[in-house]
Amino acid sequence: MKIWNSLRLTLLAMLTLASIATAAAPPEATHSDHQAERLFEQVFEQWVALSPMWQTQLGRDTNKGQWDDISPAANTRAHHLYQQQLEQLQALDTDSLSPANQLNRRLLINQLQTNIRHYRWRNHSYPVNQMFGWHSHIPAFLINSHTIQNEADIAAFIARLHGVAPLIEQLIKHLQHQAEQGILAPSFVYPLVIQDSRNIISGAPFTATAISATDGAAKPSPLWQHFTQQLDGLALPQAKEKRYLNAARDALLNSVEPAYQNLIQTLTTQERASDTRAGVWKLPQGDDYYRAKLKAITTTEFSAEHIHQMGLDAVARIHQEMKQLQKTIGYKGDLSAFFNHLKQDPALYYANTPQGRQDYLADTRSIIADIKQLLPDLFGRLPQAELVVKAVEPFREKSAGKAFYQSPAQDGSRPGIYYVNLHDLSAMPRYQMQALAYHEALPGHHMQIAIAQELTNTPAFRRHSHYTAYIEGWGLYAEKVPQELGLYQDPYADFGRLSFELWRAIRLVVDTGLHHYRWSREQAIDYFVEHSPMTREDATREVERYIVLPGQATAYMVGLLEIEKLKTKSQRLLGNAFELKAFHDIILGSGALPLNTLQEQVDTWISSINAQQQ
């Protein structure tokens, strides 16, 4: 099970690093440099070879009809591969490498050491959860990553449908093995994932019980609808199209449906054995596991106690900033009353109707189009990959998060996707939509991830590396960037930006509260509602996310504070020589980095600017 998670972390996980380091490289690479660079590429290709799904996400056609092997044996093979690769990297003659390749080697060694350390925790995650579980990842992958452009792609799609049964069988065995060790998700998870699983096998060709509201006909299941639409777009001869439709229907009915029924049965059984304890402290060696997660996610040595206090301090600071903005808006009550006003004023929300959903999408696209035109004022390097805005698919919208981003294919065959969850528009207020779009799309995740993938003078493993504190810290910083362009003209929208910063500060408190201080789910929800303008329903969804993804939520504010600290330091040391566009290009120009390495990059840039001034 962990192999895909590990590789996915390596995928989402290793995005790039080169501009400064490359600039420091000697004019001619040495024999040792060539040897190291061949090894870097070999390591990356060995990782990719382990994962047919990653190959598809990279835009490759190799093994396109296969799923990843998520068996314990495959996980162990990956672990041994990491150990072998580490030995090869450690054997390189470091002194004869260019500065760029010394940095490449160090980062790759750190990534492998992290993977090797976390082998101990390979059974501690929740592989079926309401956020990113395998039950929803399978259809989402087939719909959004497996492109269908020719008959070979059709055959590979059908092969993957047939492969769902053995894949889910591996997943069920893993869930059962976890249960034997006392590792079960909290009880609230099961109704959500069971319903999502039922949604996958509801409607044609599985059942005729799902009825379309428009024409009264049987509503197609998500996979069937997607496949038939893709087939229509190819304009095949009728006989050939019918043959492919029959083959896909057979795979859905004889592989996908029984596999999901078995998964639902397993989850129903495990639900009866689950309990309401929320934190991972309840797992075997759970406290050690949480410490390991915090270290890996924040790329710092911060303790849970330190992170918790960072959150409390940030909440107090942001509340004061909110009170000042509240005066600008002209609201007379206290902050708590203003929070209630934000939750209840219908003018601040779209109508919870199909038209309201269309309006939200249209306005979001307009926000992105507006800032896209202004980005050259603040960035020297811009992404080439296209970006589209989509609503979260109905089969997973009830349990998915507020919004999220899917990276583009490296070869340009698939755009980056900004997903917004429009299931309940009462959880998507107008005053937050600007900050949300800036975080997930531009100048946030799409800009950072697409630029990283497009860097040409860096090893492939760095163009696809993932350091959560850097990536999410940039996303949160990106919510503030439009202030430089005067785009928060509506004080409510600026308050929405502050509410998002508050949201991330609360995450530090709540995540550590759940997993270190042993808060209950209800205690965490109460804290959220009391200290933010979030509705209880929205706060519940947020807290449930932190429960199944321990430590992940701490990355945002930790990363933001580091980027802001580096900006302040650069302004102080460079004075009039400081240029915001150049600073942004330094932050983004090397791809995702551990925070300590990011600091080194900025320090090198500051020194180079100062040297030029002398």
Image (spheres, helix red, strand yellow):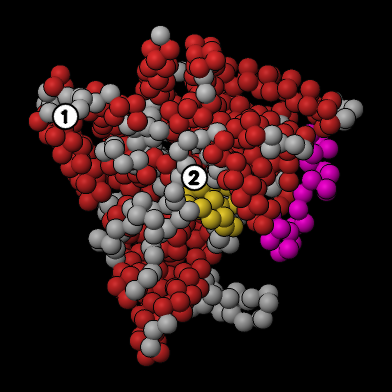
Q: Secondary structure at mark 1?
A: loop
Most frequent secondary structure within the magenta stretch: helix
How many other residues sit within 10 Å of disc 1, few (<14), some (14-19) or many (≥20)? few
Q: Is residue 150 left or right of residue 405?
A: left
> Which one is nearer the viewer's eye here, 531 or 121?
531
Let me know if residue 520 is in the magenta part. Answer: no
Q: Which residue is mark 2?
A: 446
Residue shown at 22% from the left, 51% from the top: 49
Magenta residue span? 339-360
Judge whether residue 529 can be spotted in this image.
no
Let me know if residue 356 is in the magenta part. Answer: yes
Residue shown at 45% from the left, 60% from the top: 144
Residue 28 bears which disc, if any? 1
Q: Quadrant of the C terminus?
A: top left
Query: How far, Cα to Cα, is label 2 from label 1?
Result: 34 Å
Q: Percent from the top left, x then y, of residue 354?
A: 71, 64
Residue shown at 12% from the left, 34% from the top: 35
Q: Is residue 116 left or right of residue 427?
A: left
Asked if 402 appears above or below 534 in the picture, the reply is below
Judge whether residue 38 can be spotted in this image.
yes
What amino acid type should be assigned to the residue bearing mark 1?
Answer: Glu
Q: Give the label, 2 or 1, closer to the camera.
A: 1
Q: Percent from the top left, x then y, of residue 378?
A: 55, 33
Q: Earlier in the sequence, mark 2 or mark 1?
A: 1
Residue 413, quarter of the rendered image: bottom left
Q: Percent from the top left, x then y, of residue 583?
A: 48, 26
Q: Percent from the top left, x then y, of residue 345?
A: 84, 44
Asked if 225 appears above or below 392 in the picture, the reply is below
What amino acid type should be assigned to the residue bearing mark 2?
Answer: His
